[in-house]
Image (cartoon, grey):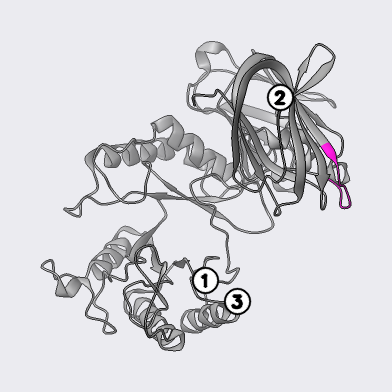
Amino acid sequence: MKYLVLTTKHHDGFCLWDTKQTDYNLMNSPFGRDVVKELSEACKRQGLRFGTYYSVCDWHHPAFPFGSPGGKTAKPNPDIEAYTQYLRNQVTELIRNYGPLNTLWFDVAQGFDAARGKAVVDYVRSLQPDILVNNRCANPGDYDTPEQKVGAFRMDRPWETCMTICRQWSWRPDDRMKSLKECLQTLACCAGGDGNLLFNVGPMPTGEIEPRQVERLKEMGAWLAQYGESIYGTRGGPYKPTKAIASTRVGNSIYLHVFQWASDTLTLPPLPRKVVGWSLLTGGTAQVTQTPEALTIQVPEENRQETDTLLKIDLDGPALEIPPIRLASGLEARASNVFHGMDEYAADQAFDGNRDTRWATDGGTHSAWIERDLGKPLTFGRVRISEACGDRVQKFELQYQVGEEWKTALSGTTLGEKFEAKFPPVTAQRIRLSILEATEGPTIWEIELLPSAQ
C-alpha cells in the first residue's frame, strides 16, 4: 500500500478523533483514545500517506436537516449554515492536527448544492493547497470515485475505485471474502484503466482487522513485492482492459496482464512502435510476433498462470505516446445505429458486463435495435436492462429469433436504469432489443439475460 484512508466520521456523526466541536466522539467512550492521531502517526512512521474519509451528511447533529433512519427524517430545527460551519471547523481540525493529509474523502453531500460544496472544497484547499479532494462534496473535486466496480478506462481525469475486500463496508462474521485471484485482477484492471484502487477492510469490534483479511492483504503485498513494477508509477493502456487482459505502461515498456487464454495464441491489435524485446515476468518463455496487422503472443500452457500471466514488452520509444487501443470484446453484437460510429459506443458495450460502458445512438434517433448472437442456444426467462441518460425509451420489444423469424418474448413502455422483468422461458441463440419509440437517441448501459429462477 502507498496510502491509507480512515473513516473518521460516517453518516451517524460519531467522530473517531479528539474533536472540540462535539462530545459525540471516541474520547468520551470507554475506549477514550484518539484513533485518528494514533493511525496518522503510525502512517508517518511507516512511510504511508494518510487521508481521511469524512461524511458530509450527519444524521446525529441537530442542525443537519435530515436524520435517521437512512437520512429520511426531517429534523425539527435545521440550520444548514450552522452545520456547514461545524463541518468547516471539523475539517480544520483534521488537516491542522493530523495532516498534512493525502486526501480528504467526502461522502454523501445530502442537502448541499453546488455552491455550498464548492465553498467547502475551496476552504479545504485554503488550509492545505496540495491536498487531493474527491468528487463527493457536491463538487467535481480532483478525482472520481466509482464504487464497488472497476472504473472505465480514462486518462483525462484521475479516478479511484473504492471496493470492499468482502461484500460490505463494515465487518460482519463469515462475510464472503474475495479470492486472491479476484483481488489481483481487480488491482491490475484498475491500473490498466489508468486508475487507483482504494481497497476497504472493516475492523472487527475489537478494532483488529480479521486475520483472514490480513492474510489476503499480505498475499497481495507479496505479489506486488515481486511484480509491483507493472503497477506502481505506471499509466493505463495502451490496450484498454477487458475480462481477459489489462495493460499498463511506463517509459518504453508495456506490461501485459493476461487473465484468460481463449486459444494458444493471443492476438492483439498492432502497435505503432517497434517491439525490441520481451520477457515473461511470471516465469518461462514467450514468443511475441509483430506485424503491421497484429501483435501475437504465444506462451506455453505450462507457463500460463491461473491468476495473471505477466509479460513485459519493450519498445523503441515511449509507450505513453501510443493512443489508447480498444480490444474487440469477442461478443457477436450489432446495432442499427451507433453514436458517430465510435467503437466505445458499439453494440457489444451493452453486453460486456461493465456498467461503465454503454451502447449509444446518434442524437435525434427515435427508434433503433440492438442484437446479440449468444454463441449457442440458451434458455432464459428474465431480463435486466439498465438505460443511461434518463427515461428516453417509451416503447420496446425484447425479441428472439426462430429460423428467419423474430418473435416477441416481452414488450413494454419505459425502461429506466433498473428495469427487470420475467417472461415465459424461451430458448434461442440470437436476441434483439427493438426500441420502437424514444424521445431522444437511446443509450443502454447493460442488457443481461437470466434463467427465470435466478
Dot 1 amino acid type: Cys
Question: Disc 3 vs disc 2: which is toward the camera?
Answer: 3
Expressed as whole percent of the image width and height from the top left, the position of residue 84 reads 44, 83
**Residue for point 74% across, 43% down:** 324
Q: Amino acid at mark 3?
A: Ala
Q: Is residue 291 visible?
A: yes
Q: State the residue in front, 340 or 434.
A: 434
Secondary structure type for disc 1: loop
Q: Position of residue 164 (x, y in %)?
A: 40, 46
Q: Give the class, few, some or many, for how many residues have Cα within 10 Å of label 3's Cα (few <14, many ≥20).
A: few
Per the rendering, the mark at residue 114 is: 3
On screen, residue 264 above or below 132: above
Highlighted range, magenta: 361-368
Residue beneath the point at 35% across and 65% down: 10
Pointers 3 and 1 in contact (C-beta within 8 Å): no
Q: Quadrant of residue 295?
A: top right
> Mark 3 vs mark 2: which is more N-terminal?
3
For mark 2, give the secondary structure. loop
Q: Which mark is residue 137?
A: 1
Tell me if residue 269 can be seen.
no
User: Gap in Å between the C-alphas at discs 2 and 1?
Assistant: 39 Å
Q: Are marks 3 and 2 in contact (CB under 8 Å)?
A: no
**What separation in Å lies between label 3 and label 1 (alpha carbons)?**
8 Å
Q: Is 363 a magenta residue?
A: yes
First in sequence, mark 3 or 1: give its number. Answer: 3
